[in-house]
Image (cartoon, rainbow, N blue to C red):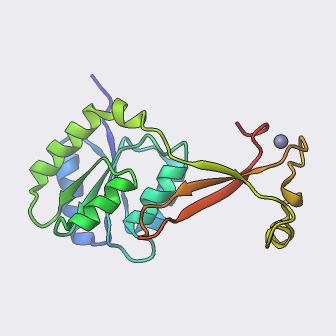
C-alpha cells in the first residue's frame, strides 16, 4: 500500500476550502489548509506536501507570490502546484504557468471530482516537473560603481567580498515573470562557499 498523499489547500474562502477538504479526505488524501499565501509559506516551512492547490486571488499574500517564493527555494521547487483561476483568463493562467505552476483549474466550472482527477494526474507525472531547470543569472557588482558602496554599506556586504574565503560575491538574479517589464528577485552569494 502507498502512504496517503498530502495536499496543501490554499484558499481564502472558508466555504470553498471546506468543500475541497471534504472531497479530498473522502478520496483518501491528507489535507493541510492555509487561508492565504503567508500561511501557506508557514505551513511549507514545517511540512512537505506532495502537491499544492493554490488560489491566485487572496488577501495578505496572493498565489503569484507563493509561486515565486517556491520557485526560488530549492526545498520547495519540486512540489507541483495547481492554481485555481477564477475564470481561466489567459493572462492569469500564463502568468501562473510562467511562475512554475504545473497546471490550472478553472474554479467556476470544475467539479470537485475533476479536481481530484487533475491532482492524481499531476502527481503521477511529478518526476518530470521536478527536473525543471531554474532560470537565474549570476552577475558581479563592481564595488566602485554607482550606488554599489552604499548598497554594500547598508546591507553589510563587505564590498561584495565573501567574509569566509575573500572571493568576490556574485548577485544571483531570478526572473519574476509576474511583472510586465523584466523584473528580478536577487540575492548575493559566494560562488566558492555556497555552490
Ligand atoms: Zn566564500
**Horizontal relation, residue 112 to residue 138: left or right:** left
Q: Quarter-wise, where is residue 120 in the image?
A: top left
Task: Please give the count of numbered marks on the rendered protein.
Answer: 0
Quadrant of the image containing the C terminus: top right
Q: Which residue lies furthest to the bottom in this view?
A: 59
**Horizontal relation, residue 164 to residue 26: left or right:** right
Q: Picture coordinates of residue 134 (x, y %)?
A: 50, 43
Instruction: Kindly tell me whether residue 113 is visible in this rendering.
Output: yes
Which residue is more in the foreground, 49 or 188?
A: 188
Q: Residue furthest top?
A: 1
Q: Picture coordinates of residue 79 (x, y %)?
A: 41, 43
Q: Quarter-wise, where is residue 112 in the image?
A: bottom left
**Residue at 11% in and 49% down:** 114
**Residue at 19% in and 56% down:** 105
Q: Which quadrant does ligand 1 occupy? A: top right
Which residue is more in the foreground, 54 or 166?
A: 166
- Looking at the image, residue 153 lies above or below residue 43: below
**Horizontal relation, residue 41 to residue 157: left or right:** left
**Residue at 88% in and 59% down:** 159
Q: Picture coordinates of residue 115 (x, y %)?
A: 16, 50
Q: Picture coordinates of residue 111 (x, y %)?
A: 9, 56
Quadrant of the image containing the N terminus: top left
**Residue at 28% in and 36% down:** 123
Which residue is more in the foreground, 183 or 39?
A: 183
Instruction: Kindly tell me whether residue 17 is visible in this rendering.
Output: no
Amino acid at each position: 500500500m502507498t502512504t496517503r498523499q498530502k495536499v496543501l489547500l490554499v484558499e481564502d474562502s472558508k466555504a470553498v476550502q471546506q468543500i475541497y477538504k471534504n472531497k479530498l479526505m473522502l478520496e483518501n488524501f491528507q489535507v493541510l489548509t492555509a487561508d492565504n499565501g503567508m500561511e501557506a509559506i508557514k505551513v511549507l516551512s514545517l511540512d512537505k506536501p506532495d502537491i499544492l492547490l493554490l488560489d491566485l486571488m487572496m488577501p495578505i499574500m496572493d498565489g503569484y507570490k507563493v509561486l515565486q517564493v517556491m520557485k526560488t527555494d530549492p526545498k520547495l521547487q519540486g512540489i507541483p502546484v495547481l492554481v485555481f483561476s477564477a475564470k481561466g483568463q489567459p493572462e492569469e493562467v500564463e502568468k501562473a504557468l510562467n511562475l512554475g505552476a504545473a497546471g490550472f483549474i478553472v474554479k467556476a466550472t470544475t467539479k470537485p471530482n475533476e479536481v481530484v482527477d487533475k491532482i492524481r494526474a499531476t502527481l503521477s507525472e511529478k518526476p518530470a516537473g521536478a527536473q525543471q531547470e531554474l532560470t537565474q543569472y549570476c552577475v558581479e557588482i563592481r564595488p566602485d560603481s554607482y550606488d554599489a558602496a552604499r548598497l554594500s554599506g547598508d546591507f553589510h556586504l563587505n564590498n561584495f567580498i565573501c567574509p569566509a574565503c575573500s572571493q568576490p560575491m556574485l548577485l544571483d538574479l531570478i526572473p519574476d515573470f509576474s511583472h510586465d517589464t523584466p523584473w528580478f528577485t536577487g540575492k548575493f552569494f559566494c560562488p566558492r562557499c555556497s555552490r
